[in-house]
Amino acid sequence: MERSTIAMATSVILLSGRLTAAAATRPVRVDCDAGGSINATLAKLPRSGPNTLLVSGTCREHVVVQAYDLLRIEGAPGAVLMPDVPSPLRHTLDISSSRAVVVTGLTIRPGPEIGIALTSCQDCAVERCRFEGSLEGSGVGVAVEESGFARILDSSFVLSASEVGGGVAVFVGDASAAKIGRCSLEAQVGWPGAWAGLMVMRNGSAVVWDSTFRGFGVGMHLEAGGWVNLFRPPEHPGQGDSMVVVEHGNCGGIWIGQTAELKSEATTRLRVKDSGPDCWASGISMTGGSLALGGPVEITNSVGPGLSLSGHSVARVTGGGTITGNALGVTLDADSLFVAASIWTPGVPRLDLSGNGTGLACDATSLVQNGAQIDGTDPGTCANIRP
């Protein structure tokens, strides 16, 4: 009899636990057009989830998510989150010290400095969101900072900036990491306007695939230990090779500064085109940085060089491709090194530098290796070419 009573009590306890968990995962609706508030709703929820908010209407508030686990903020069709005016806060959505927070399906209007700030946020995600509007000063669409990790997937950015050289669509820094896939990033007014589609610095890192950067001052800006790998992760399968496109960068396609690195895997194609005309723009410009392209590259129609190396830069373009239709093909100075694919590497296509004003130009301190694998060059413009 006692055993039967204990078993029954245990069953009741287990059932009660299951019902509590089920209730926690049931979406809580927030209708901002009917006076609902995301902040007020969050305040009523336990910080340890899972919890889901289903948001509808136009929400005019600066939302703060601090120290939450397993939270999903999902926008119904047409849902908008924009800043409340006036407000001392400068972020539309501030997520900090949290884990597994997902923001999906919302239109975000940055206000006015940052659209979504992800600070010390682990395994967080921004999915199927649209960012639109004007950034003030050095404003950012999405910022991943302070040793956080986030995924930014299937989202679009259409941004302008209120001053020359300001504004970044996505920023990754302070030893944080991001995965950016299937995104469209566009500067609405170009230069003068939003400076960079992606900025990675202060030991930040990013993996990028199947995305387009259009109309910024530069499509990508890497410096101070920033690292970007163009590569489609296996957990995000797709058809054929991955493609990353950087186009209409008014002052350049990609800029790689001191101690920064850009690389691509063999299965990713990089296309950089139409860099300029507002600056003497290079398709890829390097100052003390590192470039390692294992996949095919196509750099066309730059106002300046297709690829420019200076200040002890190292570029290894071993996946073949074309750098053509630019004012200059590849230029090197200040003890820089350019390496094409080895002649002994089977099956790797040659690199074509034909169709530029000058195919290859370098000063006496710089070196070109595996020059025999490069077409369209004039050896007279570069003294140090090794076959």
Image: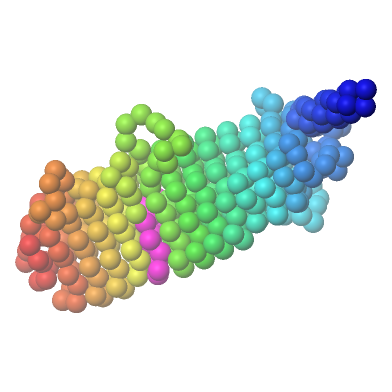
Give the image's coloring scheme: rainbow
Image coords of residue 243 (percent x, y): 35, 39
* In front of the other: 355 or 366: 366
Residue 228 found in image quarter: bottom left
What x and y, as percent, mark residue 21? 78, 31
Determine the residue positioned at 48% across, 56% down.
Answer: 205
Magenta stretch encompasses residue 2:
no
Q: Which of 377 and 43 is in front in this view?
A: 43
Q: What stretch is highlighted in magenta?
A: 249-262
User: Could you tell me which residue is drawn at 17 percent across and 70 percent down?
Assistant: 367
Quadrant including the N terminus: top right
Where's residue 123, x and y in %? 60, 46
Residue at 65% from the left image edge and 55% from the top image edge: 119
Does 253 lie within the magenta span?
A: yes
Q: Can residue 320 be seen in this view?
A: yes
Q: Residue at 49% across / 44% down in the picture?
A: 180
Depth check, front residue: 295 or 160: 295
Image quadrant assignment for residue 384: bottom left
- Relative to 203, 283 lies left or right: left
Q: Main secondary structure of the magenta part?
A: loop
Looking at the rendered image, the quarter that the C terminus falls into is bottom left
Visible residue check, residue 162:
no
- Residue at the extreme front of the image, as rendered: 1
Left/right placement of residue 224 relative to residue 363 reads right
| Residue 133 figure quarter | top right
Q: How many marks?
A: 0
